[in-house]
Image (cartoon, rainbow, N blue to C red):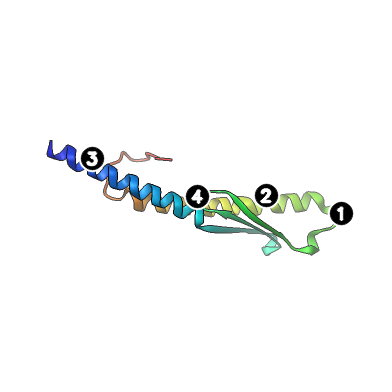
Amino acid sequence: MRDMMGLMKQAQAMQTKMQEMQAELERLDVEGQSGGGLVRVTLTAKGHMKGLVIDPSLLVPNDKEILEDLILAAHEDARKKADRIMEEKMKEATAGLPLPPGMKLF
């Protein structure tokens, strides 16, 4: 029974850490780039887009597809960075808990 109480305390501590981590991820910004920095996308670490910067040199009417591709690439770059941050924060929050390998909590 003593192990069960310890496990319950660990679960409560993890829940608190997870709530703190979620709030931190919402405040943390990541930036993705493409085209050598000509297109920059800013996301929260949770993936919400906050900003988009496009260098004026890319605003050529006949190059619409290139600009669209650069925007998508910059967004993907930012999303991957956010995913890495989220994984790191999750490892910190679950450190010491006996979770099965590969288990994802969100």
Instruction: Find numbered disc 2 in the image and state the secondary structure of the residue it sits on.
Output: helix
Vertical order, 20 against 4 (above or below)? below
In the shown orientation, is residue 95 left or right of residue 86? left
Alpha carbons under labels 3 and 2: distance apart? 44 Å
Identity, as a three-letter code, of the amino acid under mark 4: Asp
Identity, as a three-letter code, of the amino acid under mark 2: Leu
**Image-quadrant location for residue 31:** bottom right
For label 1, the residue is: 61
Q: Residue furthest right?
A: 62
Q: Residue furthest left?
A: 2
Identity, as a three-letter code, of the amino acid under mark 3: Met
Residue at the spot x=64%, y=59% of the render? 33
**Image-quadrant location for residue 11:** top left
Alpha carbons under labels 2 and 1: distance apart? 18 Å
Q: Position of residue 95 (x, y in %)?
A: 30, 50
For label 3, the residue is: 8
Alpha carbons under labels 1 and 3: distance apart? 61 Å
For label 2, the residue is: 72
Q: Residue furthest top?
A: 1
Which is more foreground, mark 1 or mark 3?
3
Q: Position of residue 104 (x, y in %)?
A: 40, 40
